[in-house]
Image (tube, helix red, strand yellow):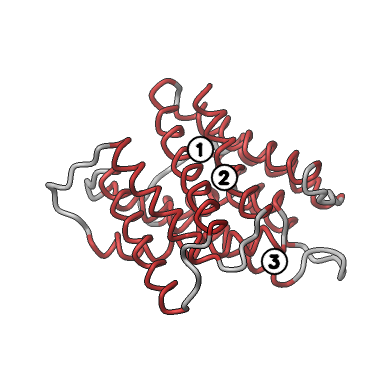
Amino acid sequence: MFFILFAALSSVGVSVLLKRYAPTYILPVLVWNYFIATILCFLWFKPQFNQSIVWWLIVVCSTLLPTIFYLLAQSLKHAGLVKTEIAQRLSVVLSLCAAYFIFNDHFAGTKLLGIGLGMVAIGGLVFKKDKSSITTQGMLSLLCVWVGYATVDVLLKYNSSLGQNFATSLNLIFLGACIVTLISTMIKKQPLLNQKTVGLGLGIGTLNFLNIALYVMAHRFNAPSTVFLTMNLSVVLLGTVVGIFYFKEKLTPIMGVSLVIALGAIGFLV
């Protein structure tokens, strides 16, 4: 349970840093984020590179990850931490749908109920009652985060189905994302060596990697269903507490109902 708790704290910590220190230029932050993640991944997992690599998947994921991180920052800014954390966790709904149609996975009726509840919860999060509710930009960025995380999950699952080693693929994806963001930063001529940028990027990258590493470690000591349920519930609840009490985000009735439905959906998706 120790690993799950700290994985959840690391996940929420990434969002807190992005929202609290919202950088003027996100690309340089992502360079340092993926730079430290690449090094930590190599030192922790000790990947082997003496195998065939599905390079098109590495390239796609290396481009997709920084894009999603940018959208995550936009979602945190315009939709808030609570909604963004829920959307991230409910991306599993789309992943399961893809697993059913693409990988021919089959699951019990309770998971179908979980998928249905997840869709309802997402609908509640992006529901725009009036001008004081979520902005159009917030709604779009939230939906992009939801779809983006699910897409990466599906691509990584497809990569595993091809017999590719997780650690090797992850290390190459981090390295590729670092190169992509570095080239983009140079093209846009954004400051790369700013002290705040370097510090924020290294902090986010460390927490981002710890989230993955501790989540993997948790599977060695706990049943997969326990890890999935505890991790997702912890992130949603922690994100809600931090969003409301630290960032003073308003919990509207519709948002509150969506939160409860989201928690129920996660329970049924085990």
Residue 98 shown left or right of residue 246 in the figure? left
Q: Quadrant of residue 241?
A: top right
Tag 1–tag 2 contact (CB < 8 Å): yes
Q: Residue at x 67, y 57 (%)?
A: 76
Q: CA distance from mark 1 to mark 2?
A: 7 Å
The numbered disc on residue 108 is 1
Q: Identify the element where label 3 is drawn.
A: helix
Dot 1 alpha-carbon crowd within 10 angstroms: few under 14, some 14 to 19, many 20 or more:
few
Question: Which residue is tagged 2?
Answer: 112
Classify 85 as above or below 185. above
On screen, residue 204 versus residue 265, left or right, reads left
The CA distance from mark 2 to mark 3 is 25 Å
Q: Amino acid at mark 3?
A: Met
Q: How many dots with numbers?
A: 3
Amino acid bearing label 1: Ala
Residue picked out by circle 3: 139
Q: Nearer the viewer, mark 2 or mark 3?
A: 3
**Residue 111 on image: x %, y %:** 55, 40
Q: Are marks 2 and 3 in contact (CB under 8 Å)?
A: no
Is residue 23 or residue 74 the one in the foreground? 23
